[in-house]
Amino acid sequence: MKAGVISIQGDVSEHLAALESAMVSLSMHGEAIRVRNVEEVREVDALVIPGGESTTISKLLRRFGMFDAIIRRANEGMPLMGTCAGCILLAKKGDSQVEKTSTSLLGLMDMRVDRNYFGRQRESFEADLSVDGLADKFRGVFIRAPAIIETWGKCKPLSRIGDRIAMARQDNIVGLVFHPELSGDSSIHRMLLEI
């Protein structure tokens, strides 16, 4: 197993550590690597798009030729997870900020997101979440977090915070508005590797 993390912005090292921990807990042989080019997108068996700034990540994915390769690999069945800004990029529809900034969305999940729904940096918070498929509560870290406003088609909510969706899955793709890599719990990264 070779799991990758897009390494152009965001919590890369934290995701790498969570993926390595998940592999150990699953007795899975493999490695977690930084993904910086299209060849590395083609090599990995699973991929994470971390948080950061969605417009910047989108532009850099295009500049480095990874944008279309990610879409192709996901459509071929590669397990893919997007967290926070990565979740925004997975959506088919965004909010007015996505349009205003001309952010290109990967459009892989039947969902609509609202950027910065939970406020700016100073409104960051943590919350215990019930997640379908996990026996225990998961401590979600929300930093300038978006929200999944609606899902349709094959996209199904896996977790909610209040009346908003915090995590959704569509086949081999998982989107989270929070940062699982900052929780110290690799359960969600295990879910990704088990897809």
Image: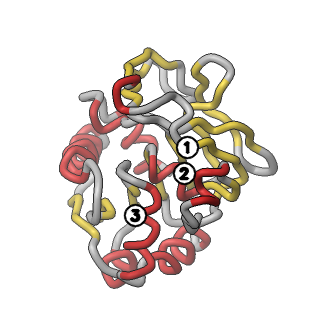
**Residue at disc 1, secondary structure:** loop
- Residue at horizontal 31%, vertical 79%? 37
Residue at far right of view: 153
Give x and y (percent) for residue 140. Answer: 41, 25
**Nearer to us: label 1 or label 2:** 1
Coordinates of residue 49 in the picture (x, y in percent): 40, 57
Q: Name the residue under label 1.
A: 115
The quadrant of the image that shows the N terminus is bottom left
What's the residue type where badge 1 is placed?
Arg
> Identity of the amino acid at label 2?
Ile
31 relative position to 67: left or right: left
Residue 56 in view of the camera = yes
Instruction: Kindly state the secondary structure of the residue where label 2 is placed.
Output: helix
Task: Write down the quadrant of residue 57 in the picture.
Answer: bottom left
Q: Which of marks 2 and 3 is nearer the N terminus?
A: 3
Q: Which residue is drawn at 49% across and 58% down?
A: 79
Among numbered discs 1 and 3, the one appearing first in the sequence: 3
Residue underneath mark 3: 57
